[in-house]
Amino acid sequence: MSENKATIASYNDYQTKLQKIADVRNTLAVLSWDQETYLPEKGAAFRGQQITTLSTIAHEMYIAPELEQLLQTLHGAEGLDAIQTKNIALSKEDYDKNKKYPAAFVAEMSQVTNESYHAWIKARKANDYSLFAPSLTKMIALKKQETDILGYEGHPYNALLNEYEKGADVIQLDKVFNDVKTALSPLLAQIEQKAPVQKDFLHLHYQRDRQWQFGIDLLKEMGYDLTAGRQDISEHPFTTSFNPQDVRVTTRIDENDFGNMTWSCIHEGGHALYEQGLPTAQYGLPCGEATSLGIHESQSRLWENNVGRSLGFWQHQYPRLQRLFPENLSAVPLSGFYHAINKVQPSLIRTEADELTYHFHIMIRYEIEKGLMDGSIAVKDLHHTWNEYYRQYLHVTVPDDVHGVLQDIHWSHGSFGYFPTYSLGSFYAAQFFAAAQQQITGLDTAIAAGDYSSLLQWLRQHIHPFGRYYTSNELCAKVTGKPLEFGYFLDYAKKKYSDIYGL
Amino acid sequence: MSENKATIASYNDYQTKLQKIADVRNTLAVLSWDQETYLPEKGAAFRGQQITTLSTIAHEMYIAPELEQLLQTLHGAEGLDAIQTKNIALSKEDYDKNKKYPAAFVAEMSQVTNESYHAWIKARKANDYSLFAPSLTKMIALKKQETDILGYEGHPYNALLNEYEKGADVIQLDKVFNDVKTALSPLLAQIEQKAPVQKDFLHLHYQRDRQWQFGIDLLKEMGYDLTAGRQDISEHPFTTSFNPQDVRVTTRIDENDFGNMTWSCIHEGGHALYEQGLPTAQYGLPCGEATSLGIHESQSRLWENNVGRSLGFWQHQYPRLQRLFPENLSAVPLSGFYHAINKVQPSLIRTEADELTYHFHIMIRYEIEKGLMDGSIAVKDLHHTWNEYYRQYLHVTVPDDVHGVLQDIHWSHGSFGYFPTYSLGSFYAAQFFAAAQQQITGLDTAIAAGDYSSLLQWLRQHIHPFGRYYTSNELCAKVTGKPLEFGYFLDYAKKKYSDIYGL
């Protein structure tokens, strides 16, 4: 065999191995999907056991020495094309990173995560942060160890940020969240001076089946391929992908909250369109995986907010919605509806926040995580720190821990560095959408006519097909000509809320 | 460690290994369930690949030398209880049997099965048996090889029968099917003299949702635990078990055929009650698995026929059914309904046959399989043989191959020896039900009052909890005091059809 032929043969071996691992991981995703949608109550214990067994199998397949050897052989080898070279580089990076974790650390992390999750549950029940603090202390200590294991330049938090958003660091994020503080705070202050928007009619009775039909129709119109996916009901909406030909979403329906189902449909639909747009030929390989959490979130938020909360979108959809729910909406004009669904109101709970105040919730978490990592914030008094931040930035008084520091599951799972990707998603979305508006002739007109095909086509061309070939920073520069800039979101928000609130 | 302690430790190892294999196999069952119920169209190709990967993993886990060693150590070891000893014996038997197959044979069988299945599809499309015959010839040659690989006493077909029903052989089945011929033929002839029963009203329009509700209610009333199972829709109804706490059934609904959904619900419900009644503590081990196909089928048929087509059952259920579908049934008296659902009519298609003529369909397949195995029937002329048997025993003329020899998928899959278990199921059911009637005070009265709890309790005590601890023959003797006797089915049929047809 010539050297190139041997390289190609090794590459094929590598690809087969990764695809088999993907088969097992995607099977785990099927088990989880079933667990959230259709699993009968008593099946939970055995399902947990099944998931443990399959996870162990996937892990053992991944750490097998044959894969490591192949990666060593192929890393830097000639005779591979650009995508193949990138796959090998990323797989090697993943593999080497995984290898850094000592077994003892993994075992301890697993135990502390379990303990901390249960402590969080208990603390929520008792509405008492002090019951969570001891576990959280252990968790933080372990996460600090992890930053040493992973290595970092600059701030230790960078090591964790990099896990969720490759290339993100405190320099970028300090700047972004400083912009949130300095630029969004005045906007929020202006809005708070205005008369509150009326939105009670969104909480009248919206019949279940008609909501479902409206949501499914929206997904179809967005271009979600229902022959390569499906929607079901679950407690918390989510998107899961088993491969680009089988990408499923879930939603929930609250008959007294019209918005709950609608924007969860559009949001998950955005995630799902991204997954359906990933290259099938790269199944199981890095270039077949989503770029990053931030980019994933940019896709859901672009559809949810830039499209799904725009006036143009509802110019087309609202008459249909009125026909579906005449008893609730026939007396509400489009403008009233549009204002209602974009009402800005500082609140306590992140997941219920509007598009503007949302980023204060994230900024607060970012500051806290950074402070926990460099020791400038103590775990013991975290609830006080939390409450003080909420008072300062959102002007709300946190009445108790459940409505404060205990509201999110993330820390109990050891997910530090995750929160910022939510805001990054919105900011990438604003920058991408601005580029789309510039590059697609008549985009706003098309959206106002219920035609989203040119937008999807643009996303399919510029964002979806690359997987991890580019980092989020690289992708952003490639698509928009610039690195991530908060200004796009600021412009979008200023324009939108000036119109709505008459600023 | 004392010898006993070491034995127990090895047994625990063995149990853990088998349970992990069961986790993977049950995961495969989840993938298949999803494939038949909710898989989006385009997901099929990747799903096939996922199933192949998982099957290979399960197979590799099973043939790992560690398991073989444990079985050798534990086989005949002291210090195990009766169930543990039986588990080891059966696992060793399974393992040794699996080991008999040379890799080359397995590969060839897999290839020929694939070829033969596609030839069958093609032959059905062209309605031409001759397109299937060449593949079937290869398949039969392989199945003969398989009988040599497995070994047998007496007739080579015994080796295959034993695969589906341990202990079954041509001596037992010749006797049973001879009884079908000699005892059921005269009964059938008598019925054919009588005026045909009217059953058109079963094919009026029965609204989908109301059918679904009726079916779910029946399942609940039978005692099927919907917190440890669920019902969904699929093209062909089936039962699948992931463990006794998660046993799922499917049904189909034909709005112009009331019977389709109803008896598929009751039939699958019978299978599901059995699976829910298997011992959870024996998960993954032989004593946690169904005794045999015949016993599994006895459970579905006991509920479907002995209960679900009885007059007593409908004395309670029919008024409710009439209230659900007054437009179709208010003018039909119970007796008319009861006669209609038990109409005897010789027909061409096995799966559409009534409870009586069904066994002629099976007997014909049994005779043919036996003849193919000992060479007394040639593959080439099989369609003529088939048609001649149908003329002789069922007095129907087979118009073409699709309505004849090509109707069942089994042979294309290499499933020879499977068909007899369907009849065995009915005959075991009759014998079990007779025992239940004798042992349960007031059973018929209870059923006529819609109370099936004493029956389920009896099955849960006498049939369900043993798994493979007993063979079907042993179980039958234990429960009824006798080996399988066709007389129970004959008595049941004679009584039933004499009443209905006034013989």
Image (cartoon, coloured by chain):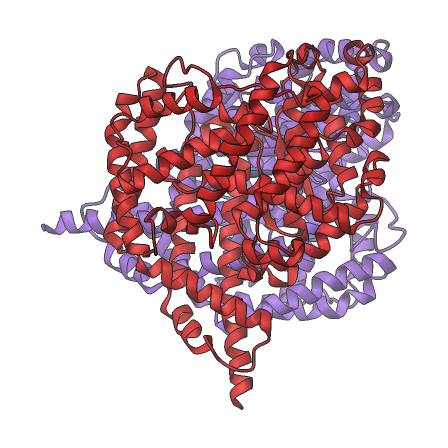
Chain colours: A red, B purple
Q: Quadrant of residue A314?
A: top right
Total numbered labels: 0
Question: Would you place residue B110 above or below residue B427 in this image?
Answer: below
Q: Quadrant of residue A326?
A: top right
Query: Is residue A166 in view?
Result: yes
Left or right of residue A139, residue A344 in this image:
right
Seen as rendered, the residue at the extreme left is B2
Residue sitting nearer the eye, B97 or A312? A312
Question: Would you place residue A65 above or below residue A495 in this image?
Answer: below
At x 55%, y 63%, the residue is B156
Left or right of residue A449, residue A227 in this image:
left
Q: Quadrant of residue B323?
A: top right
Question: Where does the C terminus of chain A fall, quadrant-wise?
Answer: top right
Q: Position of residue A343 (x, y in %)?
A: 64, 20
Q: Position of residue A171 (x, y in %)?
A: 43, 48
Residue sitting nearer the eye, A423 or A502? A502
At x 55%, y 24%, the residue is A353
Question: Would you place residue A204 above or below residue A72 in this image?
Answer: above
At x 42%, y 37%, the residue is A366
